Amino acid sequence: MKTAVDSNVLIDVIGQPNEFTEAGVAALDAALQRGALLVSPIVAAETAGHFSSGEVLRATFQAMHLEMRSFDWLDLHSAGEVYLNYRRRNRAPKVRMLADFLVAAHAFAHADALLTRDRGYYRMYFPKLVLIEP
């Protein structure tokens, strides 16, 4: 089983310890026991500021068994469609939603599930995406 990992779970684990850190570590360990862990380039970028260099980022992701998989045209199209639908439905759409929709479309295409703490809008806009909550 391939599990895509959202940046919020990784930041809980690699950033300052918080109320979600322990559950994030346990969820990552459990997902790794089931199979591969994947991240999108968006997740890598959203977590990159927590590292002193790109090399440290890459080395840490490798040590955590996180494989970065590139976007393909289908992922980008899917995210764009959902984002356009979101913008039509909301009077004041959040600009950052495109990044979240890219993460979800990538997970849907390349993994069996997405490990995330963001459930609501993923369930609404990607109803077939399997979500795992830490």
Image (tube, grey):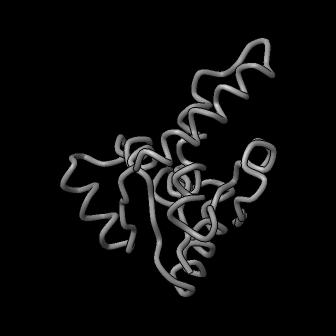
Q: On the rendered image, what quadrant is the C terminus found in?
A: bottom right
User: Is the residue 1 above or below the residue 111 in the image?
Assistant: below
Q: Position of residue 87 (x, y in %)?
A: 70, 21
Determine which quarter of the picture holds residue 79.
Answer: top right
Residue drawn where x is 57% and y is 33% of the image: 80
Seen from this angle, which residue lies furthest bottom? 33
Residue drawn where x is 34% and y is 64% of the image: 61
For this view, does 54 lie left or right of residue 89?
left
Residue drawn where x is 72% and y is 28% of the image: 85
For this view, does 77 lie left or right of residue 125?
left
Q: On the rendered image, what quadrant is the N terminus found in?
A: bottom right
Residue drawn where x is 38% and y is 74% of the image: 65
Q: Position of residue 38 (x, y in %)?
A: 45, 65
Q: Position of residue 124 (x, y in %)?
A: 81, 44
Seen from this angle, which residue lies furthest top? 91
Determine which quarter of the picture holds residue 60.
Answer: bottom left
Q: In this figure, what is the number of numbered marks?
A: 0
User: Is the residue 76 above or below the residue 62 in the image?
Assistant: above
For this view, does 65 lie left or right of residue 52?
right
